[in-house]
Image (spheres, coloured by chain):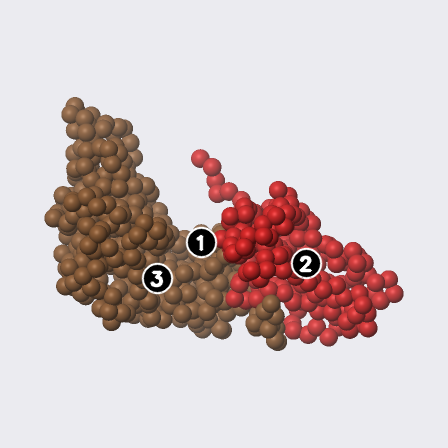
Amino acid sequence: MLQAGEWAYSETLKEHFMNPKNILQGENTDDFDGVGMEGNLQCGDQMMVVIKVDKEKDTITDCQWKTYGCASAIASTSVLSEMVKGRTLDDAFHISPKEVALELGGLPDHKIHCSVLGDKALRAAINNYYTRNGQEDKVKQEQAKVICQCMNITDHDIEDAVLEGARTYFELQEHTKCGTVCGQCKDETEVLLEKYKHIHFGA
Amino acid sequence: MADMKVYFDHNATTPLHPEVKKEMIAAMEMFGNPSSMHAYGREARANVEEARRKVADFIGAKENEIIFVGSGSEANNTVLSLFVCSSSQCIPGSRRGTIITTKIEHPCVLETSECLAHQGVRVKYLNVDRYGKIDLDQLAGMLGDDVGLVSVMMANNEIGTLQDIEAITKMVHACGAYMHTDAVQAVGKVPVDVRKLGVDFLTISAHKIYGPKGVGALFVKHGTPYCPLIRGGHQERGRRAGTENTLGILGMGRAAEMRMIEMPEEEERLLHLKQVLQQGIEESIDDISINGHPTDGLASTLNVSFTGVEGEAILLYLDLEGIAVSTGSACASGSLDPSHVLLATGVDAELAHGSIRFSMGRESSMQEVEYLLDVLPPIIQRIRNMSTAYIKGGLHAASR
């Protein structure tokens, strides 16, 4: 007879959950050069990332965080905080959820969405640093593009739906109602669907 | 890792009662098909019928009113599915095409209802108050000559709230509809007598009463219209096809018998444990709320929401300490929505994500409660220390 199996998570993820690194102690973020927060408590995930920046070299010297969320959310912020130290702001800005998941030794499919907020919060912190230091020109907004005009569905909505489990055009329509009126956006939506499936799930 | 093992998830499932285990092991060589006329078959038949008598006794039913099925979910599916069949033996869907149920039922009732709605059955859902009690006035308003069946669970699996099935059944019968109760969580924890309740259908599961998994029973009051969900065999007097799960049924019979003996003296002890647990949590942890009914609930079930903490994290940190509980958080379920039961009671989504259900059972001890009370406060403290919910402006402030 088999004994109790391991958690649904990798050993690396479990280690980061059991011993999270770089938790921001207390509430004070004054010592940090950039602060970013994403997500909300109603949805069950919220992450805050704070960074210290070497202004000469534009590199991140310290990264701390707070997370409200499940084990994979906690572990992915923890591992992210380790990954970004020493990286340039530009480099850190482009860390993808997939890299975070990879560093964690993989995430179960239904947990991918938990890891997405960490890098979003990091980008918000980097943008916050740029804004505070008179470098507004460097701020990169994550602007959403409306794909389905009829239902006002953006590429972000489509990405969210993929993260929440939509894998086919039909499932995407069930999630978002995109393309349910005139249907002209179908081709563009299908391209995005494949793109986000590839980015997040390597499918 | 942890020395002590604490199983506080009895509403999910229970360990086999030692007596059940003993009897099942002794019966392991019994392989005959109860339908066979030879000695092997007659041995199996005798044991199945003995188990039927024990289960019937336990809930005050007659033996021929008990149908053995594969699970509580199957029993619930069977009852609800009576409504899409237009055979004259079944409850005529055409004339009484409405089903009433509640928003806090088990998913096997809710999803079957949804499926029936696609097939043209009208389904109405009763609201519950903040304690999880259904609104009898709302029920009265919904009842009419279009209603064929009302299905209300007796005890809720997540928050333990008990409904007044006896009163509900009287109302339902007065309008000429049939009454079903999913009593999977109630049977074995509180006295259940089908005659006193007056119900037409009642669902039981073996593995919630220290019996084996994969076996349940459906009580169908004598004379009630019925149509099998699984067809093609004469087993269970043509009411549920498929060769009987003889060993499982035997185990269920023994489990029911043991519950009859042990249940009466157990409730007070469990209630005391729950009070100590609740008081201990209230005294040692700030910002919590208790879900469920303060008095009219299962003695063994305590559901608590911890502000600013996500339930899966609590569950897994407790798992590392050898303590097994469950959570209403979305993350632990694989879905994206937190507990539909807590949301129906008006609990905020954030608090639903941070809910933990402690469900105790016959072997739960004060020592286990004390161990839990030692371990839990530092875990909550630790998670809150890393939670955005506990920073200034963090609470809901960063909503996208």
In x, y percent, where is residue A202? Answer: 64, 43
Label 1 crowding class (10 Å Cα cut-off): few <14, some 14-19, many 20+?
many
Q: What shade has chain B been given?
A: brown
Q: Chain of mark 1?
A: B
Residue B269 in view of the camera: no
1 and 3 marks on the same chain: yes
**What is the spatial separation of the Cα atoms under label 1 and label 2, in whole angstroms?**
32 Å
Label 2 crowding class (10 Å Cα cut-off): few <14, some 14-19, many 20+?
many
In x, y percent, where is residue B11? Answer: 35, 54
Q: Is B276 left or right of B138, judged from the image as shown?
A: right
Quadrant of the frame with the N terminus of chain A: top left
Q: Is B380 left or right of B298, judged from the image as shown?
A: right
Q: From the image, tell me which residue sits under label 3.
A: B103
Quadrant of the frame with the C terminus of chain A: top right
Q: Amino acid at mark 3?
A: Lys
Of residue A139 and residue A92, the one placed in the foreground of this image is A139
Q: Amino acid at mark 2?
A: Asp
| Residues at discs 3 and 2 in contact (Cβ within 8 Å) | no
B222 to B171, vertically: above or below: above
Q: What shade has chain A been given?
A: red
Q: Is B72 left or right of A15, judged from the image as shown?
A: left
